[in-house]
Amino acid sequence: MPRIFFIKVGQNYIIIMSAAPGSAMDSLSAALKCNIIPNQEYLLQGSVLDQYVEVLLHRLRGLCDNVDSGPESFHDHELSFALRAQGSGAAPMVLPLRVRRALDSPESPWQLRYVGQQELGDKNRPTVVRSSIDMACSSTIVEFLTELGCRMDFEYIARGYMFRKGRMKITVSKIFKMGNMNTKPGEGVEPISQSYLVELSVLAPTGQDAIAEDMRIFAEQLRPLVQLEKIDYKRLGNMS
Amino acid sequence: MGVTILQQFPTENRTGPDTIELLSKRIKALGAMQHGNFLVDCETYTSVPQLGHQRTVHVLHNSEQPATVFSILDTGTKTIPLATDGLFDLLMMKMSSFYTSKKQTKAESKGPRFEIGDFCVKLGTITVSSNFKGILVEVEYKPCVVPAMCWDLMKEFLQGFLGFSVPSTPPTYLQNRMQELYTPIDTIHQYLEQFMIYRKSPGIGVRT
């Protein structure tokens, strides 16, 4: 019986078949060697004021692939965890982990994601690049992470629309502070600002830098409605 | 996916391959057909002292669910199961400064997989860090997902080809869950229970 190994790439799966059931770690090593695991995120971010979001959505509807079906809406709850320990050196070791669940689709699997340190690169590099490991998981994840030793740093609710253009993903989302969890979705939450967060991202295997150029060109087409840039979190000072 | 029972089979004075051969003959005589092979493996990670009280994460794979990684976190007071996509293994590598795998603990059960009517039978050779430890037989009864409703039937089937070494009570893990819906994580719990027993056992030598 051939063993089939699935690797999720965006909306699609890559399927690797081998003759005998090898160990999962062998399949993973093979996948790593072939460089087919999407573990890099190329990212540009920006924001748009509430009163202009409709204009941006209209523009995106025209530019993106899902014209017929319209944009996909989402209503997600995101929790940001970190696993911390004092390392042998002076610097503490930190492993950030994010958990996301769809409030509007409770049956869907939850998402677990590791997001690494972002690399801004020099000014010729069009986007931020950061390592990312993204996977679906069961709803036991919050308890699992808590007992694993992770601490939740913050949580929020993101509501908005998702567009696709080839391999690019564009989200326009309103961020809300967490309200009382017992209230119905959408009730008892307070927006964090008077603007929408706009993100343009692609998840790809290492070294596919050509995609960053496509993103830069696409971001150009959204100007001046929204200015998508490489955001340097370190320069945001004490906000983190 | 139906209810699954794991059952150790004593090797007595036979070698591992001889025992598999014997059981293969018996199950084929009942009309079973071999449908490939199977593999269940388990790696155990322990938290580093800087993380506070010791916790253990068992990461298991089952060729029956090839796109899933199963993890069981054992805090000492409770166990929390987790099912994720295959990339969880990559995340465990990232966690290597917090959770380290003990050497010599990788446990595996692998061997031929048979189908016979509504049953699926797997004859597993257990190894712990490549040392032969014993024979573990897995029987799945595919049409049913409530253990209480098919235990008697499965017991009879098991006794039919394993003889009366099969106990008359269900495995301990299932005893408190006889009325619940059976899911793939229940199979993983049973494998982990068995692997823990085999890890502690002194081993049967080099009869692989």
Image (cartoon, rainbow, N blue to C red):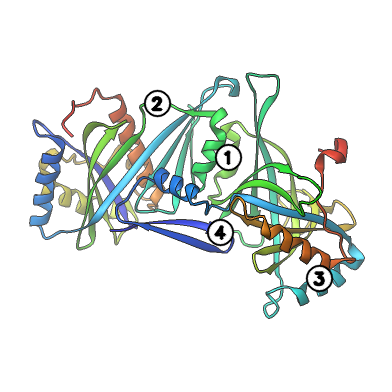
Q: Locate the N terminus of chain B by quadrant.
A: bottom left
Which is closer to the viewer, label 2 or label 1? 2
**Co-location on one chain, circles 4 and 3:** yes
Mark 4 belongs to chain: A
Question: What's the chain of the residue with tag 2?
Answer: B
Nearer the N terminus, badge 1 or badge 4? 4
Q: Are marks 2 and 4 in contact (CB under 8 Å)?
A: no
Q: What amino acid type is highlighted by mark number 1?
A: Glu
User: Residue at label 2?
Assistant: B103
> Circle 3: is it few (<14), some (14-19), or many (20+) Cα within 10 Å?
some
Q: Looking at the picture, does residue B200 appear above or below residue A21? A: above
Disc 1 designates what residue?
Answer: A143
Residue at x-position 27% and y-position 44%:
B110
For residue A173, say whether it is visible: yes
Indicate whether B97 appears above or below A9: above
Q: Which of marks 3 and 2 is in front?
A: 2
Circles 3 and 2 on the same chain: no
- What residue is pinned by disc 3? A57
Closer mark to the observer between disc 1 and disc 3: 3
How many C-alpha atoms fall within 10 Å of the one at disc 1: few (<14), some, or many (≥20)? some
Query: Badge 1 sits on which subunit?
Result: A
Name the residue nearer the viewer: B108 or B180: B108
| Subunit bearing disc 3 | A
At label 4, the amino acid type is Val
**Cα gap from disc 2 to disc 1, whole angstroms:** 27 Å
Q: Mark 4 points at which residue?
A: A9
Near mark 4 (Cα within 10 A), the count class, few <14, some 14-19 or many ≥20, is: some
